[in-house]
Image (cartoon, rainbow, N blue to C red):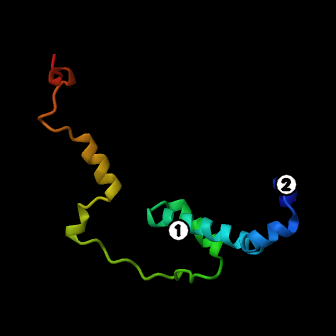
Amino acid sequence: MISAAIGCDEKTLRKHFSRELSEGALIVEGDCLDVLYRKVRQGHAPSVRQLREAIGGVAPQAPRNRPEQPDEDEDDAGRVGKKEQRLQDAQDVPDDWGDIDRRRQH
């Protein structure tokens, strides 16, 4: 079907693209896993589940019976996560920011 679609002989196609024809699905699957892994490394939470499903039983699962986490120390009680901190920082307007029209030069 591919040779007919591009207008060449089937033997010519096999000669120049034998690796892609025989291992194409594996190559594409590897590329997809690579993209998914990059998203996991960037913190994209839904990709974690997708990657686990894609690799099946290859990676060991975390133990279900985790020991209880110790109570938070007083030092950690006031901490917020990165996303929450960014949201809080975005709400704080610096004192030197004024009216945008005032800063424009006429």
Q: Is residue 68 left or right of residue 54?
A: left
Residue 28's label in the rendered image is none
Residue 74 appears in view = yes
Image quadrant occupied by the C terminus? top left
Q: Is residue 82 left or right of residue 45?
A: left
On residue 7, the disc is: 2
Dividing the picture into quarters, in which one does residue 60 lie? bottom right
Q: What element carries label 2?
A: loop
Q: Can residue 21 be seen in this view?
A: no
Residue plotted at (56% across, 68% down): 34
Q: Distance between the residues labelled 1 and 2?
A: 37 Å
Q: Tell me the amino acid under the disc marked 2.
A: Gly
In percent of the image, x 11 and y 34: which residue is there? 96
On the image, which quarter does residue 52 sit in? bottom right
101 or 46: nearer the viewer: 101
- Looking at the rendered image, the quarter that the N terminus falls into is bottom right
Query: Which numbered marker is on residue 37?
Result: 1
Q: Which amino acid does label 1 sit on?
A: Tyr
Q: Where is residue 92 in the image (x, y as percent from the top left)?
A: 21, 41
In this view, the residue in front, 106 or 97, is 106
